[in-house]
Image (spheres, helix red, strand yellow):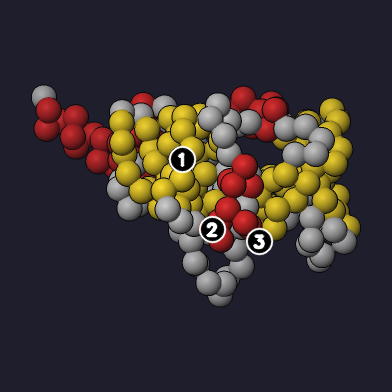
């Protein structure tokens, strides 16, 4: 479990194919990592395979590659990092599982005074889970839904701190991003579905 509060922006400095999947060697500021622990890399929960002070490796299997942008990652790419939440830590963002629901596409990036507005196109099946001023994770970053300006579009308002401390400041139209909807909304939708279907009959 994660909070969506990014604690480091790492850099992929090696990519290779292994028996464990597509492996990424990531440079970071972390020390004290342990093999087998979970780490969110751009919002995708992956397992640390090897590690040392200032680096770790993770591997993505075919099912992860199918559902994410991980297959597009190349050497030199910066990625948002967050270690798993420890019991007793502050939950400053929202509950993030590190389970990517879909890949969204950036459609517009505009500046409005001191905020940067980002419009992201999402799959239609995620639209019911989007709530104005509700929570969403984009590339692992806990954010607030600023508006729903059009069908299948969610708008974010990025503050200066987020722009400086994550990779989101580099977003441009056409970029692909990981989208994770609020897990509470997903459970409510799932539990309510049979009752809504019965009421419609």
**Residue that numbered label 1 is attached to:** 110
User: What is the quadrant of the N terminus in the image?
Assistant: bottom right
**Residue that numbered label 3 is attached to:** 7
Q: Nearer the viewer, mark 1 or mark 3?
A: 1
Q: Is residue 69 visible?
A: yes
User: In what element is the residue under mark 3?
Assistant: loop
The disc placed on residue 160 is 2
Mark 2 to mark 1: distance in Å? 14 Å
Mark 2 or 1, nearer chain start: 1
User: In what element is the residue under mark 2?
Assistant: helix
> Residue at the front extreme?
113
Q: Residue at x 85, y 41 (%)?
A: 13
Q: 26 and 20: which one is in front?
A: 26
Q: Is residue 157 visible?
A: no
Q: 27 and 90: which one is in front?
A: 27
User: In what element is the residue under mark 1?
Assistant: strand
Percent x, y of residue 25 = 84, 43
Q: Nearer the viewer, mark 2 or mark 3?
A: 2
Mark 1 to mark 3: distance in Å? 26 Å
Q: Residue at x 46, y 45 (%)?
A: 111
Mark 2 or 3, nearer chain start: 3
* 96 versus 110 height, above or below: below
Would you say 66 lies left or right of 27 here?
left
> Residue at the bottom extreme?
88
Q: Residue at x 81, y 66 (%)?
A: 32
Res 72 → quadrant:
top right
Percent x, y of residue 8 = 69, 58
Rate crowding at label 1 as few (under 14), some (14 to 19) or many (20 or more) other CA atoms within 10 Å. few
Q: Residue at x 73, y 32 (%)?
A: 73
Looking at the image, do the residues carrying marks 2 and 1 touch, with CB atoms under 8 Å apart?
no
């Amino acid at each position: 479990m994660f909070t969506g509060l990014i604690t480091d922006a790492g850099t992929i400095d090696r990519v290779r194919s292994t028996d464990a999947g597509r492996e990424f060697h990531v440079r970071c500021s972390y020390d004290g990592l342990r093999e087998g622990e979970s780490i969110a890399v751009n919002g995708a929960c992956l397992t640390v395979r090897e590690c040392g002070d200032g680096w770790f490796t993770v591997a993505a299997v075919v099912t992860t590659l199918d559902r994410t942008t991980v297959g597009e990652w190349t050497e030199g790419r910066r990625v948002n990092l967050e270690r798993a939440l420890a019991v007793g830590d502050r939950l400053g963002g929202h509950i993030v599982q590190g389970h990517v629901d879909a890949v969204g596409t950036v459609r517009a990036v505009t500046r409005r005074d001191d905020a940067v507005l980002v419009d992201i196109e999402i799959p239609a099946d995620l639209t019911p889970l989007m709530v104005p001023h509700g929570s969403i994770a984009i590339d692992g970053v806990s954010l607030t839904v600023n508006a729903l300006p059009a069908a299948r579009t969610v708008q974010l308002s990025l503050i200066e701190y987020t722009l400086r401390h994550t990779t989101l400041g580099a977003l441009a139209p056409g970029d692909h991003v990981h989208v994770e909807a609020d897990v509470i909304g997903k459970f409510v939708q799932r539990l309510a579905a049979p009752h809504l279907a019965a009421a419609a009959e």
